[in-house]
Image (cartoon, helix red, strand yellow):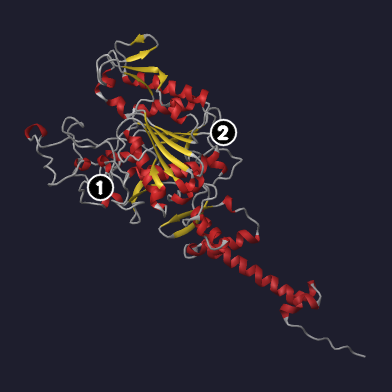
Amino acid sequence: MRTEIKKLPPLEALFSMLFSKRRAISGIGIVLFASFLIFTVLYVGNDEGAVRVDSSASLLLWIFSVDPEVRSLDQRQGEIQISEPSLDSNYAKRIVPGKSSVDESQSNDFGDIAPVEDLDDRSSSGDEEQMKLKMSEGLISECDIFDGRWVRDETKPLYPPGSCPFIDPDFNCHENGRPDQDFLRWRWQPNACEIPSMNALDFLRRLRDQRLIFVGDSLNRNMWESLVCILRHSVKNKTSVYEMSGRRQFKTSGYYSFKFKDYNCSVDFVRSPFLVREVFNGSQPGSESDRLRLDIMDETTAAYRTADIVVFNTGHWWTHEKTSRGVNYYQEGNQVYEVLDVMEAYKKALLTWAKWIDENIDPQKTQIVFRGYSLTHFSGGQWNSGGQCDRETEPIRNESFTREQPEKMKILEEVLRRMKTPVLYLNVTRLTDYRKDAHPSVYRTPQSTPPVNPSVKPQSNPSVKPQDCSHWCLPGVPDSWNELLYASLLRYAAGPWARS
C-alpha cells in the first residue's frame, strides 16, 4: 500500500526539519521579529533615523537589558543622536588632592533632576519619568563645562527684566534705562556636552531646610542677587520670599539673608572682599595706617562655618591702587612688609583661607565652592580714568581677542590642588571674557538723557561719570554662573545637597 506524501510549502518545510509541525508557526514569528530588530538597528544608525532614536533606542535597550548610562544623548538643534561618552574627566573642576577628580564608581549623571513643574503639582509618575528622561539627555558624558561658547537663546533670560525687586540699582540696567535687550538672549554652551537648564523649583527642593551663602566681594553680591531673583521667579507666592531684616539695598557691609519660607531655606550673602582680615587703624577706611592681615581670616567666618553650601570669591579688590602697590600695607604676625608684590600677597591670603577651610569645615556637611575671576572690559582707561564699554552690544566672536588666563587664577588653582577639602571650582574667567556687551556701563545709574558720546574725553566733559565695566547687568551673565553652579552641584556636591 502506497503512502501519499503531502508536500509542504518551502518555508514550512524548512521549519519542519527543525521543529515539529506544531512549532512551525512560532518559528516563523521568531524570524520576523529578528528581522524587525535588524531593521531597527540599521534605521537608528543612519542619519534619517536619528530623530527617532528616542523610541527605537529605548526598545533596543529594553530588549537587550542595556544600562542606559553606557550611552550619552547629545542634543543639537532639535536632533538627538547617540554618541559615546567623553573620556574627559574635567566636567566640573572639583579639586580633590591625591584623588581622581571623578569617582568612577558613581554613575556619570547629574542625579535625579526634578521636572520643571513643582513636585507637588505633578499628575502622574509616568509624566514625571518622561520629564526626567528629557532633562537627562546629554548629561551623561564627562566634560569641562567651562570650555564652550555663547549661543543665541530666545528663551532667555531666566526672569523678565524689571520683575525682581531685589536687584541693587547699580545692577538694574533695565530700570536705569538701557534700551537694548539682545545682550540677554545668550546661553553658555559647553563644547563637549549638554548641561541642564536651571530648574529653580528643583534647586529649592534640594535646598530645603538648608542654607546657601555667598562670601566675597561685590561680584559675588552680583551672583547672589541673580540667584535670589531666579529662585523667587519660580515661587508662586512671592510674599513668601523676603530679606530677613527687610532691607532692599545691599551695598553696605553686613549679613543679608533671603528666606524662602515655603522651603525653609535661605540664600545669604556676607561681604568679605579679601577673605582675610582688614585692620582699620585710622579714623576711616582708606587711611595710610590700614593693614591687610594675610595670616588671619576675616571676622565673618562665624557666618558661614556651619552653612550647607558656601560660594567664595576674591579678586577685584586686589587690583585697587593700595593693594596693587603693596607699600606698608600687608602684614603677617608683627611684620609689616615695606613692599610686597600683590600676587605674592594674594597667594598668602588664599593659603590662609585654604588652611582655615581644611581645619574647620566638615566636607560631609558643607559643600565648598570657589568662583573664579570675572574679567573686566574697560576701553580707553580704567574705572576712574575714563574707561568705557557702553557702546558694546554683542559678545566677542573672535577668540583671538580674548585674553590669557589671569595670574590670579593660576595661583588659585595651585592652592586648591593642595587642599584636602574637595572644592567645586567654577572657572568662569574665560566665559566672562567674551561678554563685553553685558556690563552696566553708564546704566549703573538712571539715565534721563542719552549717554554722552564715548568719543568725548572725561576731562573735557565734566558731565561724564565713571562707567561700570566690571559688574554685570541683572538679568545677565551671573544667571549663567548660577546655571553652572546648579549643574556642578548636581554632579559633584557632597553633604546635604547630595542626599536630598
**Does residue 277 appear left or right of residue 176 in this picture?**
right
**Residue 364 visible to the viewer:** yes
95 relative to 247 in the view: left or right: right
Q: Which residue is nearer to you in this view: 167 or 367?
A: 167
**To which quarter of the image does residue 6 belong?**
bottom right
Total label count?
2
The answer to whether 328 is drawn above or below residue 132 in the figure is above
Separation of residues labelled 2 and 1 (CA atoms): 43 Å
Residue 179 in picture, x, y percent from top left: 20, 51
Q: Residues within 10 Å of mark 2 (few under 14, many from 20)?
A: few
Q: Position of residue 74 (x, y in %)?
A: 47, 53
**54 or 467, which is in the foreground?**
467
Asked if residue 199 shows in the view, the reply is no
Q: Amino acid at mark 1?
A: Glu
Left or right of residue 469, residue 414 in this image: right
Under circle 2, the secondary element is loop
Binning the other alpha carbons within 10 Å of mark 1 as few (below 14), some (14 to 19) or many (20 upward) gives some
Residue situated in front as seen by the camera: 160 or 137: 160
Residue 20's x, y, as percent? 81, 75
Residue sitting farthest toward the right: 1
* Residue at the limit of the structure toward the bottom, as seen here: 1
Locate the C terminus and report the quarter of the image it occupies.
Answer: top right
Rendering quarter of residue 363? top right
- Disc 2 or 1, which lies upstream in sequence? 2
Q: Is residue 442 left or right of residue 360?
A: left
Q: Is residue 239 above or below residue 276?
A: below
Residue 251 percent coordinates (x, y)? 29, 34
Q: Is residue 289 above or below residue 392?
A: above
Residue wearing tag 2: 364
Q: Which amino acid is tagged 2?
A: Gln
Secondary structure category for the residue under label 1: loop
Q: Which residue is disc 1 drawn over?
A: 394
